[in-house]
Amino acid sequence: MRAWVIWLLGLSLSVWAAEDPVLAVIGDEKITAGQVRAYVKKRPLLAGYLATGYPGWRRVLVDLIDLRLLNREGERLKIPREAEDDEDLYALRVKRKLLPPCAKPDEKGAKRFYQEHPERFSTPAFVRLNRLELPVSAQIEGKPAIEFLQEAGERVRAGEKNLAELAELCPQGKACLQDLGFVRTEAFAELGEAGLKALQTAKVGEVVGPLVVGEWVYLYQVTARREPILAPWEQVQAEAAEEALRFCRSEAFARLRQDLYRRYGVVLHEKALQTLR
């Protein structure tokens, strides 16, 4: 009887762990999906991010980690807390103390920034995508889904087949083929750095994949592109200096974050993040 109770307790704990996966660690501190949800409940402006799957969850997780790290670093450096400080206000105080000052450039410096960073003054790049998707566990013509899509990509590249013809072999038929329309490639961060770069650089007609995300495997084909359009200097002249200032601050914080990640041993569990929907 006792052994049965212990087994049942272990099973319950396993189920609970599966429902509340660890998404990151800060040294020996674990950050779970439940903690991210609790964090969002106190910050309604972040709630919409979780509905977007991987990119939104990752965005909120990084925000939570930033908060924890800034509080830890402030305590390490013995930066005093004010009476009104909660963890958010204290983190902001620490951040302001640690970041180097950024100076707003004059018009000449603003124009130089415009010329060196055209992406900050351009419309986003869009690609139109077709996507063939299968569960990783699927078998098609006796082959695992990944192997099937690998061969499918090779046949499309060789001009032997198109995605619509290959979709007819899927267990769910043509439903496994989707026209995603025009999308910003940044929305596909869950594909990882290599997959994202492949989509960003692929020419019209090229196939990218197969790429595994959680329990699914995807094959993409770029069917059209809308390249960025740079706004003329005369249109952005008034805002360029402010944009340069924002860029300076974001780059400074990115460097600080990198240092803090190393100091406190931060590791993100990307595979666990990719399974969240």
Image (spheres, grey):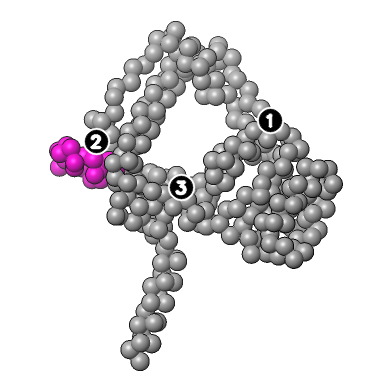
Label 3, label 1: how far apart the Cα atoms are = 27 Å
- Amino acid type indicated by mark 1: Arg
- Side of 119 relative to 219 (left or right): left
- Side of 259 relative to 199 (left or right): left
Quarter-of-image position of residue 181: top right
Label 2, label 3: how far apart the Cα atoms are = 23 Å
Q: Which percent across, then down, holds residue 104?
A: 36, 16
Indicate whether 274 appears above or below 84: below
Q: Residue at x 18, y 37 (%)?
A: 77
Q: Secondary structure at mark 1?
A: strand
Q: Residues within 10 Å of mark 1 (few under 14, many from 20)?
A: some
Q: Which percent across, then down, holds residue 105?
A: 39, 13
Indicate whether 209 appears above or below 14: above
Q: Which mark is residue 58?
A: 3
Q: Secondary structure at mark 2?
A: helix
Label 1, label 2: how far apart the Cα atoms are = 42 Å
Residue 156 is covered by the magenta coloring: no
Of label 2 and label 3, which has the lower sequence position?
3
User: Circle 2 sits on which residue?
Assistant: 94
- Amino acid type indicated by mark 3: Arg
Q: Residue at x 31, y 39 (%)?
A: 260
User: Circle 1 sits on which residue?
Assistant: 226
**Residue nearer the viewer, 203 or 83:** 203
> Mark 3–mark 1 contact, CB under 8 Å?
no
